[in-house]
Amino acid sequence: MLCASSIALAQRVETPVASSEEEAMAALSSRIETLEQRLRALKDREAIENLISVYGYYLDKALWDQVADLFAEDGEIEISRRGVYKGKARIRACLDLFTAQGLTTGNLRNHIQVQPVIHIADDGLHAWSRHRAISQLGSYDGAAFQSGGLYENEYVKEDGVWKIKRDQVYTIFFTTYADGLFEGLGPAAAVSPDLPPDAPPSVDYAALPEVFIPAFHYRHPVTGRSIRSFASVPATTAP
């Protein structure tokens, strides 16, 4: 028969073991939760990157109905300096400013989406991206153009599906293909009198030869500082 002191000793020995098991289970549970969060974030990032690429492919073929369906019901679009169009119906209407729905024979409209930098909010329901577009536009036996733009976009997840909340592209340069990068430069597109926007352009800027860098939605990854928008300064003349 065990004496009281033996029972007390056994209890003292068993208690740390039980506590250690509980701590190990808690640590394992926490690790699993962290891994699940990271997996969700990776899947969200992949979905948004696919959304960006799909958007570009639909633009290529002037599939305006499909482009508009990528947006949330209360989404917004602001292309170049054309102003802001709000809501899916207005987004769809403004796309007709570029060309009629559907790519016709002899026309080229390439919109290459590259260099996405994506950040997802902790709630997993909101996200932002900064990415670049390189465009080739033209018609057979007609004019041909090339341009570059910089996107600062916002996204929202609705019923588990990522959609575009705000689509904004800044025109960096727009030029004729025949005249080249500098001889054929043109201005950033302005507000259309045929279909006035719901709000004026949110940013006043100019394309190349001026230089404009839109504000970054994210902070510098090393210094943690925010980087706001700024334009080029006048060139100094050598003495």
Image: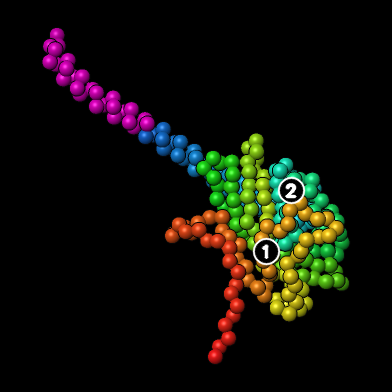
Query: What numbered label is drawn on residue 86?
Result: 2
Task: Give the residue type at disc 2.
Answer: Lys
Query: Dot 1 corresponds to which residue?
Result: 204
User: On screen, 155 above or below 226?
Assistant: above
Could you say whether the residue bearing mark 1 is in a helix, strand or loop? Answer: loop
Q: Quadrant of residue 32?
A: top left
> The magenta stretch spans which residues?
1-26
Residue 103: x, y in percent? 83, 57
Whether residue 195 is situated above or below residue 139 in the rendered picture: above
**Count of numbered labels shown in the rendering:** 2
Q: Secondary structure at mark 2?
A: strand
> Crowdedness of circle 2 by 10 Å Cα count: few (<14), some, many (20+)?
many
Task: Indicate the position of residue 173 as horizontal and vertical percent values.
Answer: 69, 70
Q: In the displayed structure, would residue 47 be above or below residue 145?
A: above
Residue furthest toward the bottom? 239
Identify the residue at image location x=41%, y=37%: 31
Q: Is residue 57 visible?
A: no
Question: Which tag, 2 or 1, sits closer to the chain's start?
Answer: 2
Q: Quarter of the image containing the N terminus?
A: top left
Please tell me whether the stretch drawn in magenta is mainly helix, strand or loop. Answer: helix
Residue 122 is left or right of residue 135, and the answer is: left
Q: Which residue shows up at 60% across the image and 72% down it?
A: 232
The answer to whether one can see residue 20 in this image is: yes
Q: Is residue 176 magenta?
A: no
